[in-house]
Image (tube, grey):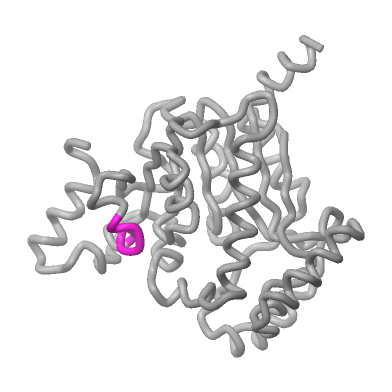
Amino acid sequence: MADTEQSRASDSAAASGCDPDFDTRSPYPETADIETSNDDYATRFRGATGAWMLEMQERGVLRLLRSGSNPVLPGSTVLDIGGGHGQLAKPLCRDGYRVEVLGSAPSCRHRIRELVDTGVCAFRVGNVIELPYPDNSFDAVVAVRMLTHCDAWPQLVREMCRVSRGPVITDYPTSQSLNAIAPALFAAKKKYERNTRKWTLFRHREVLDGFAAAGYCRTGRFAQFFLPMVVHRALKCRAVSAFAERICRLLGLTRLWGTPVIIRMDPAEDRTKQDSGR
């Protein structure tokens, strides 16, 4: 990857005596992924319960990626926006996808440095709402834990759709769930979790409308949990959490009121072609 923002940022960090893995400087307006890519944020998913929550996310993303009439199979190119946390880059690379992670600062490579240093995964520094790629550059684009922390999320949506020649898979927390009371309990949540931060709750329609404006429509959906994630963290028992969520899913509660929601969005013209061919 020749003269990219990544190499220039790394050179700048080296010249200033700063280890690129810990250089959080960024000239860009949306930098939510700098925090989600650090070691402190990773502690939110430590232990058996945290691992289980990440497994649910991984299962949902991989299932949606391979679903439908246009599955994205191993060997395909995938852009992981804000994926320096490694929650998707690691399983995607493991399964044989050709992954590039875009981060807002050099430090965003810290938790995926082994993948990057061994050439398994590419990394680039860039602006998440003005992506440094031509149109239709990747077979798929993924982004988790981004929409909810991005003020300019409609622009992020447009850019994801612009650089993908296939699906876009992303997630969001919805107010159409038990999370509706979350804003009122934020102070208590922060006191317990310590490293939580404010986020945006979406109604399903506003996310779908944002993608529709970019010419994309929903073709898949996976709701992760019925109970708020803070409840599972407080329980600290993977078996109890998994059992409770299994019951909620069987009762249809998760489908109706689950959150966060992972969605697969595809170009609307592709869906129209499929429908007309039936």
Can residue 151 be seen? no
Q: Is residue 187 magenta?
A: no
Figure quadrant of residue 148: bottom right
Q: Which one is nearer the viewer's eye here, 262 or 9? A: 262
- At which x and y percent is residue 15? 8, 61
Figure quadrant of residue 17: bottom left
Q: Which one is nearer the viewer's eye here, 90 or 124? A: 90
Relative side of 159 to 122, left or right = right
Residue at screen point 52% across, 44% down: 142
Q: Which quarter of the rendered picture does the N terminus lie within?
A: top left
Residue situated furthest top in the rendering: 277
Residue situated furthest front in the rendering: 239
Most common secondary structure along the magenta stretch: helix
Q: Is residue 55 above or below residue 127?
A: below
- At which x and y percent is residue 50? 57, 72
Which stretch did the figure color magenta? 108-114
